[in-house]
Image (cartoon, rainbow, N blue to C red):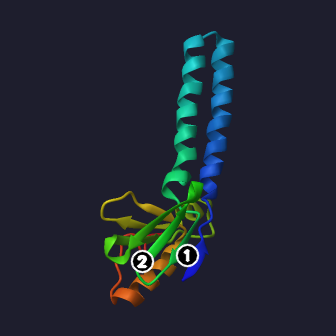
Amino acid sequence: MQCIHNPPAKWLRILSFIIILWVVILSLLFYMIGSTLFALLVPLFGLTAFIILALHPLLFRPKSITITDDGIILNLSLNRHRTVKWNEIVEIYTIEGSPLTVIGRMRRAGGIVQKSMAPIDLTYELALKVKDEYYMKNGDCVYSIWRNRK
């Protein structure tokens, strides 16, 4: 059994900061113009987007995973654990973005698609390790159409 850390996506934090900044700027702008309706609706929209971005890592991104003989154990936030058996995995995808550009670094990701649950977000490197382990345990690997996409 090996436990591997799954760091959070930095681009989600940056996107959250940009949304908050734009909400503040637009709210002040609409308030100065005199449109109180838009001055109230813009923060409501921004708060909704921020909550969605804040909940995404808590719900769909494990802090770490443990690879076992039977499958993987997801160590989720709030001390929750969930086991995914090898036969429950439909697809293991990796998106190899270019590490030299900002867009490429944002695209560089991986994950696991399960039969009955939501997809699990992983880093590219971690998804490759899970894919290699899946190949060693089952003899064939689940490849994705995204594998060679840059």
> What x and y, as percent, mark residue 60?
48, 56
What residue would you read off at disc 1? Answer: 125
Look at 55% across and 75% down and name the residue there. 125
Identify the residue at the far top of this view: 34
What residue would you read off at disc 2? Answer: 71
Q: Amino acid at mark 1?
A: Glu
Quadrant (top left, top right, bottom left, bottom right) of the N terminus: bottom right
Q: Residues within 10 Å of mark 2 (few under 14, many from 20)?
A: some
- Residue at disc 2, secondary structure: strand
Q: Quadrant of residue 8?
A: bottom right
> What x and y, as percent, mark residue 26?
63, 25
> What x and y, as percent, mark residue 138?
34, 87
- Residue at disc 1, secondary structure: helix
In this rendering, the label closer to the viewer, 1 or 2 = 2
Look at 64% across and 57% down and name the residue there. 10
Q: Amino acid at mark 2?
A: Gly
* Residue 144 drawn above or below residue 37: below
Q: Are marks 1 and 2 in contact (CB under 8 Å)?
A: no
